[in-house]
Image (cartoon, helix red, strand yellow):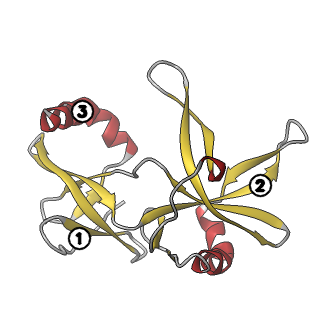
Amino acid sequence: MADNTQPIDDSAVVLTDETGRFLPCQVEQSFQLNNREYLLLLPIDAPIEIFVWQQDENDDDEVLMDVEDEDIDQIFLTAKAVLAEQNLTLQRTAITLTASGELPEPEADNCLTLELDDLDDDGNAVTEEFQILATCFYEDEEYTLCTPLDPLLIFAHRTGSGELEVVTPEEFQTIRGGLEEKLFDLLD
């Protein structure tokens, strides 16, 4: 995915995707690896995930499923209206949906843990924790609007022309060891 940038200041950039949507990000770290500048970015506004409750194919239980990107357009205005009731502004940004405004404090009864299809290095199921911000209904389906409790970190590299490009999963796997070493060096 090719991304353009316009610097806001030295500590922030704006990623732009191929559809023209943008995502303002804070630059958390910048470093050189393999003669290329890499940046570790954190979206300025809160990332938002939309899940839908669907019947599990294997039993009668309902499970939370990711809403596919092409289906977000259908639910977007409803989700935006529901979040506006909490003084949050839902935005259709590059890479992820975001919400501007002050998030409520997470509490045990409004958090959930989802088991992802991935396995960690030890072979254990990867989980991700979310804070539930709201639920809504659209065409007889229940949707849950969440924000991840862990920060959404984005790796990007600067191209020869000075634009930023988000690191693809394949590229990340090839440079992962070097990135981890650089990050650990920065933490020391």
Q: Toward the viewer: 7 or 160?
A: 7
Task: Name which residue lies at 48% across and 49% down.
Answer: 149
Q: Toward the viewer: 28 or 108?
A: 108
Q: Which residue is mark 1?
A: 5
Tell me the element at label 1: loop
Cα–Cα span, label 1 and label 2: 36 Å
Q: Which residue is mark 3?
A: 180
Task: Name which residue lies at 32% across and 63% down.
Answer: 2
**Of the two numbered discs 1 and 3 in the rendering, the one whose residue sits closer to the viewer:** 3
Tell me the element at label 2: strand
Q: Could you tell me residue 43's position as x and y percent?
A: 35, 62
Q: Quadrant of the N terminus?
A: bottom left
Cα–Cα span, label 1 and label 3: 25 Å
* Residue 117 falls in image quadrant: top right
> Disc 1 residue type?
Thr
Q: Could you tell me residue 87's position as x and y percent?
A: 53, 79
Q: Toward the viewer: 54 or 89?
A: 89
Q: Toward the viewer: 18 or 7?
A: 7
Q: Could you tell me residue 166's position as x and y percent?
A: 31, 56
Q: Is residue 144 left or right of residue 34?
A: right
> Disc 3 residue type?
Glu
Tell me the element at label 3: helix
Cα–Cα span, label 2 and label 3: 36 Å
Task: Name which residue lies at 58% across and 80% down.
Answer: 84
Residue density around tag 3, few if under 14, some if 14–19, many if 20 or more, within 10 Å: few
Q: Quadrant of the C terminus?
A: top left
* Residue 133 falls in image quadrant: bottom right
Q: Is residue 17 left or right of residue 77?
A: left
Can you name the residue that lies furthest to the top here? 122
